[in-house]
Amino acid sequence: MSNKRNNGTLGHEEEIDQNIELYFFSPNKEKDDFIEQYKKVKVDRYTREKGYRYSPLFIIQKDIRYCLGARKQFNDIPKDKRDPANFAGVILIYTAFYNLVKKFYSGNYPGFAKKFMSIEHDDQKILKYLRHGLIHNNYSLSYYKNDHKYYFILGAGLDELIEKLEAKRSYPSSTYLIDVRKLMRIFEQGIQSFKEYLLDRNHSKARKLFTQNFDVDTWIYIKESKP
């Protein structure tokens, strides 16, 4: 039996594959590459709307790379002169992670982090506290929880994603070094692993959930300017 429908359009599974590829479009490619792919995959919508829509995951990954000085367009800035926006990068990574898992993995944040990013529960907790400090504690690198104060130092080039420092204080506290660039790479690798998981047609439940929550109407619309 042919995978194509009688009218020549894509079959259901092929359409799901195309939607997965579009949503998880690689941040290694440029916006023009995405636009060309969108025009091919969503030709009817593109013609009707006279414009295109960006995958939110594609855009936020580009923004994360911009914050952390990881986009090739900005290589003219000497590396020793860069001042990465680490705080903003962490917030965007968490935002991307939260929305991806909420929509397409039933909100199972610990499960996704462990399965696709190899981040265990204890490290998940520390990263969550870092995010809470930035969002809920006046954009700072500290967070208070259960009579315990958590401090964070952000950087790059660590052997591990998170390293604990020994620091003696007069009150219960902990200090953690966190490699933000490594966190970005782990998240990007997790996204790729999840994409491959969804493209495996044996994972029918995951593909069904993706299809139920895949909604181009919510994507950023850009009206195409006339030449």
Image: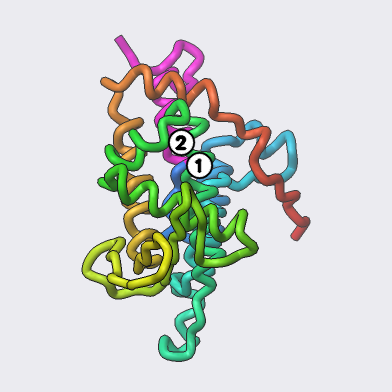
State the residue position of label 2.
101
Mark 1 lies on a secondary structure that is helix
Was residue 6 drawn as part of the magenta stretch in this picture? yes
**Where's the N terminus, which quadrant?**
top left
**Contact? badges 1 and 2 (CB < 8 Å):** yes
**Label disc, if present, on residue 98 of the rendered structure:** 1
Was residue 177 drawn as part of the magenta stretch in this picture? no
Which contiguous range is marked in magenta? 1-23
Type of residue at label 2?
Val
**Label disc, if present, on residue 212 of the rendered structure:** none
Q: Position of residue 82 (x, y in %)?
A: 48, 84
Q: Residue furthest left?
A: 159
User: Quarter of the image holding residue 177?
Assistant: bottom left
Please give the name of the residue rendered at 30% of the width and 62% of the height, measured from the top-left corner: 162
- Say if residue 30 shows up in the picture: yes
Mark 2 lies on a secondary structure that is helix
- Say if residue 33 shows up in the picture: no
Please give the name of the residue rendered at 69% of the width and 37% of the height, measured from the top-left corner: 47
